């Protein structure tokens, strides 16, 4: 007999908004030339996160930030473990050469998604610098990848799941930890 799954809210909608504002401030502070900044969101939830961060940076600094979306399906090394996925169209309507690129994702776990994103980004130019912003860092890395900007550090067990909900995708904003 399986016991019920425990769900703990990690970030409320208000806490999520404050976290994104803080991340946007950190990105603006640590980026030398915001006019050369591009945010590239990883499908699915990295894309709206990148858009929200760009909007917040523009509010804070008055500088519009280029935003793109990348699908990493064909760059993954673990498709046999995660199952077949239908690719989404990558949308990067600008050259990344010479830009500061910040890859944006919702949760970093083993690092494999980010490794795939790094490979994919190289198809769109040669950035001057590539950084990583994540909403939640849950640890358990298998690759030497570390985010430059972290919304929430959340130690987890390997069995637990971190679920990010965004209004633009899910109809609500929250971050939850799901486990037994």
Image: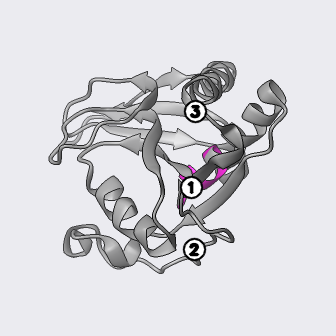
Q: Is residue 171 left or right of residue 113?
A: right
The range drawn in magenta is 43-49
Q: Is residue 168 left or right of residue 2?
A: right
Asked whether 147 or 15 is in front, the reply is: 147
Which is nearer the N-term, disc 1 or disc 2? Answer: 1
Which is nearer the N-term, disc 3 or disc 2? Answer: 3
Give the secondary structure at mark 3: loop
Task: State whether residue 45 appears in this view.
Answer: no
| Cα distance between the residues tagged 1 and 3 | 15 Å
The crowd level at tag 3 (other Cα within 10 Å; few <14, some 14-19, many 20+) is few
Q: How is the image coloured?
A: one colour
Q: Which mark is residue 40?
A: 1
Q: Is residue 74 above or below residue 147?
A: below
Residue at label 2? 90
- Location of residue 104 in the rendering, given as x and y in whole percent from the top left corner: 51, 47
Residue at label 3? 31
- Location of residue 137 in the rendering, given as x and y in whole percent from the top left corner: 36, 32
Q: Nearer the viewer, mark 1 or mark 3?
A: 3
Give the secondary structure at mark 2: loop
Quick check: is 48 in the magenta stretch? yes
Could you tell me which residue is drawn at 60 percent across and 50 percent down?
39
- Location of residue 26 in the rendering, given as x and y in whole percent from the top left corner: 57, 23
- Location of residue 58 in the rendering, given as x and y in whole percent from the top left corner: 80, 35
């Amino acid at each position: 007999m399986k016991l019920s799954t425990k769900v703990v809210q990690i970030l409320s909608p208000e806490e999520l908004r404050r976290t994104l504002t803080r991340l946007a401030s950190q990105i603006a502070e640590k980026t030398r030339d915001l006019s050369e900044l591009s945010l590239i969101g990883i499908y699915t939830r990295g894309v709206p996160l990148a858009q929200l961060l760009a909007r917040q940076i523009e509010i804070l600094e008055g500088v519009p930030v280029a935003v793109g979306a990348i699908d990493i399906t064909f760059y993954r090394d673990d498709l046999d473990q995660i199952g077949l996925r239908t690719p989404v169209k990558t949308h990067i309507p600008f050259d990344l050469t010479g830009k500061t690129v910040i890859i944006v994702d919702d949760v970093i776990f083993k690092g494999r998604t980010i490794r795939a994103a790094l490979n994919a980004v190289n198809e769109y130019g040669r950035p001057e610098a590539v950084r990583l912003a994540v909403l939640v860092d849950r640890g358990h890395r298998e690759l030497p990848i570390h985010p430059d900007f972290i919304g929430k550090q959340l130690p987890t067990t390997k069995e637990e799941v971190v679920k990010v909900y965004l209004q633009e995708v899910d109809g609500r904003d929250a971050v939850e930890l799901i486990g037994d």
